[in-house]
Image (cartoon, grey):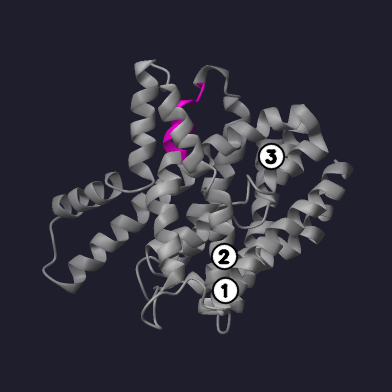
């Protein structure tokens, strides 16, 4: 539809503006080697995303969540994510964060910038009633699981580099680094606030909402800046593999599990499959930036999957229509 086409174009143009800003060095102050992409990533990861996650978690209404439908989505998504992680671990990665960075590129979709207008245009209010709960848990589940895995891998790698720690020391280091984390900590704090039953004060809610609105434009600009800074040379193969995994493999697995495993059909099934078929989300780049691993590949995967989504979305709609 025209609305979806405009949204896709807006995403690409915003990223292009970031690319122009990177090429023109508008964001570089001081030394020529200043890392503008990492500065933007840190601002998003340490300021804006924690605010968004805390507010989202604190306001969740668990009593009205469609848990069966949510399980039909996240069970196959997490399974594919863990399969990619295990595959990359078995290949002997060059750095310990490689498996989780590649896993998030296959599992984490652009559920907000593209997902909301896409679901609204195709399925209306009935579709949004399913899509919005998926969004509320999307980052919480995927980022938390991958954070635990990458911190465990980093702790093991540190043990190999020096004195090998005991299992207890490794688990303690992993637990500390996982809990004191800009993604996990605000989620836990939001859940704790939610359990008190006290609504967020109006000022706090407005402040968190204001900070949260910066996530989408900042991340899209960051994609363009990263593209200009890192380039894609030498990373196209990995980006194309992630694109195929995200746009083809993941929705296929969600379709099989949700339809034949959970018995879903009609609009609920279509919403889940199309949510899985969305292109790679910007959080994949933020995660790569956080652990200084495969930033260029994550950036290329976001751009390539967003462009290819035009064709693959039509493919999945045709498959759903045939069912």
> In what element is the residue under mark 1?
helix
Q: Are there few (<14), some (14-19), or many (20+) residues within 10 Å of tag 3?
A: many
In the visual, does 147 lie left or right of 311? left
Name the residue nearer the viewer: 140 or 222. 222
Pointers 2 and 1 in contact (C-beta within 8 Å): yes
Considering only vertical position in the picture, is 35 above or below 106? Answer: below
- Residue to which mark 2 is pinned: 223
Can see residue 86?
no
Mark identifier at residue 227: 1
Number of numbered callouts drawn: 3
Q: Residue at x 57, y 65 (%)?
A: 223
> How far apart are the two marked residues, 2 and 1, measured between alpha carbons?
6 Å
Considering only vertical position in the picture, is 260 above or below 217? Answer: above
Q: Are there few (<14), some (14-19), or many (20+) residues within 10 Å of tag 1?
A: many
Q: Residue at x 58, y 44 (%)?
A: 76
> In what element is the residue under mark 3?
helix
Pointers 3 and 2 in contact (C-beta within 8 Å): no
Q: Earlier in the sequence, mark 3 or mark 1?
A: 1
Q: Earlier in the sequence, mark 3 or mark 2?
A: 2
Name the residue nearer the viewer: 153 or 39. 39
């Amino acid at each position: 539809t025209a609305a979806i086409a405009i949204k896709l174009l807006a995403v690409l143009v915003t990223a292009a503006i970031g690319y122009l800003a990177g090429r023109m060095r508008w964001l570089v102050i001081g030394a020529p080697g200043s890392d503008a992409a990492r500065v933007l990533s840190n601002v998003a990861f340490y300021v804006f995303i924690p605010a968004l996650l805390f507010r989202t978690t604190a306001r969740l209404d668990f009593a009205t969540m469609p848990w069966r439908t949510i399980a039909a989505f996240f069970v196959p998504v997490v399974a594919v994510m863990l399969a990619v992680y295990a595959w990359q671990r078995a290949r002997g990665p060059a750095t310990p964060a490689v498996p989780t960075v590649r896993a998030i590129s296959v599992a984490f979709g652009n559920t907000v910038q593209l997902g909301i207008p896409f679901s609204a245009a195709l399925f209306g209010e009935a579709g949004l009633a399913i899509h919005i709960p998926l969004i509320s848990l999307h980052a919480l589940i995927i980022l938390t699981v991958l954070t635990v895995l990458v911190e465990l891998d980093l702790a093991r790698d540190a043990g190999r580099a020096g004195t090998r720690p005991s299992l207890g020391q490794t688990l303690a280091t992993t637990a500390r680094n996982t809990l004191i984390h800009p993604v996990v900590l605000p989620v836990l704090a939001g859940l704790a606030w939610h359990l008190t039953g006290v609504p967020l004060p109006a000022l706090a809610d407005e402040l968190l909402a204001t900070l949260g609105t910066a996530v989408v434009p900042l991340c899209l600009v960051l994609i363009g800046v990263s593209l200009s800074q890192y380039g894609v040379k030498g990373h196209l193969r990995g980006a194309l593999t992630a694109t195929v995994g995200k746009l083809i493999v993941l929705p296929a697995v969600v379709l099989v599990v949700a339809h034949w495993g959970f018995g879903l059909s009609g609009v609920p099934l279509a919403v889940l499959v199309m949510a899985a078929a969305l292109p790679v989300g910007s959080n994949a780049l933020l995660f790569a930036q956080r652990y200084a691993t495969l930033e260029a590949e994550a950036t290329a995967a976001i751009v390539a999957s967003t462009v290819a989504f035009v064709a693959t979305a039509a493919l999945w709609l045709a498959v759903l229509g045939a069912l």
